């Protein structure tokens, strides 16, 4: 996590304060600022990762995904295409006095994705949830509550379909 990279070439916007690990692989049209990305992680095109978000090692972040401030993704996590994370449950453009809200007007809510979990394409992950180790979120799900380790969940709201065994292929 020590190499600091400043790259606007290759059609990417990687801010100086981004911490990129070794051998991170970036597609084009990526916007990263104030975040950390671990070794060997691969990031697809049109991905944005905001400040104070962190991505572990050996992750795959597929194209068109948005990872906002307050999201912590551990090692070996797969994030599908067009996945959206949320960090504000009651968003407003303006404050009570009519001026545009600033960071002082709201509080970031956190989300954790534990090691080895996978999130299917087109899913939305609401804030204040933990997706457990090795869990699998079905495509197009809306995750509103914590997902237990090894659970497969799907739907809106995402419900448990079944629980995997100790390896991702074994089904209980
Ligand atoms: C959730 C998932 C793992 C389930 O796979 P599965 O266990 O093989 O499930 P099945 O295909 O046997 O479907 C079982 C039931 O769940 C439903 N189902 C499957 N996936 C679903 C999903 N994502 N959302 C809602 N319902 C789903 C099926 O319609 C079926 O319902 P039925 O019994 O009423 O007919 C898989 O469908 C999925 O969404 N994987 C994520 C794929 C993805 O996003 N990859 C990203 C990179 S391409």
Image: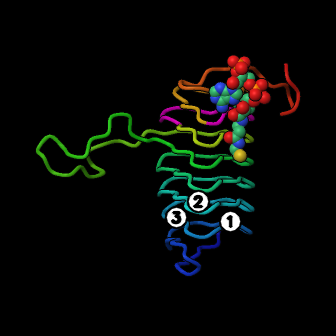
Kindly tell me whether residue 135 is visible in this rendering. Answer: no
Read off the magenta span: 125-139
Q: Is mark 2 within 8 Å of ligand 1?
A: no
Q: Which mark is residue 32?
A: 3
Kindly tell me whether residue 54 is visible in this rendering. Answer: yes
x and y, in percent, of residue 132 in the image? 67, 32
Q: Residues within 10 Å of mark 2 (few under 14, many from 20)?
A: many
Q: Which residue is mark 2?
A: 36
In three-dimensional space, the C-alpha distance between marks 1 and 3, rounded to whole angstroms, equals 14 Å
Q: Of 130 and 121, which appears nearest the observer?
A: 121
Q: In the rendered view, tell whether residue 141 sits above or below residue 94.
A: above
Q: Which residue is mark 1?
A: 21
Say which element carries label 3: strand
- Dominant secondary structure of the magenta stretch? loop
Q: Are marks 1 and 2 in contact (CB under 8 Å)?
A: yes
Answer with mark 1 or mark 2, whichever residue precedes in sequence.
1
In three-dimensional space, the C-alpha distance between marks 2 and 3, rounded to whole angstroms, equals 9 Å
Q: Residue at x 67, y 52 (%)?
A: 56
Q: Of 12 and 74, which appears nearest the observer?
A: 12
Q: Which mark is residue 108?
A: none
x and y, in percent, of residue 4 in the image? 59, 73
Say which element carries label 2: strand
């Amino acid at each position: 996590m020590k190499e600091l990279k400043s790259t606007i070439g290759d059609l990417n916007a990687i801010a100086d304060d981004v911490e990129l690990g070794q051998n991170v692989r970036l597609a084009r049209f990526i916007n990263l600022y104030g975040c950390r990305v671990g070794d060997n992680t691969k990031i697809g095109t049109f991905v944005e990762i905001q400040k104070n978000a962190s991505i572990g090692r050996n992750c795959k972040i597929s194209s068109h995904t948005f990872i906002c401030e307050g999201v912590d993704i551990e090692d070996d996590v797969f994030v599908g295409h067009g996945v959206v994370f949320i960090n504000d449950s009651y968003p407003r453009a303006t404050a009570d006095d009519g001026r545009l809200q600033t960071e002082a007007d709201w509080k970031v809510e956190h989300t954790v994705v534990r090691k080895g979990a996978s999130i299917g394409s087109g899913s939305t992950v609401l804030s204040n949830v933990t997706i457990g180790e090795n869990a699998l979120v079905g495509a197009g799900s809306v995750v509103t509550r914590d997902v237990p380790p090894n659970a497969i969940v799907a739907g809106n709201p995402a419900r448990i379909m079944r629980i995997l065994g100790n390896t991702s292929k074994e089904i209980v």
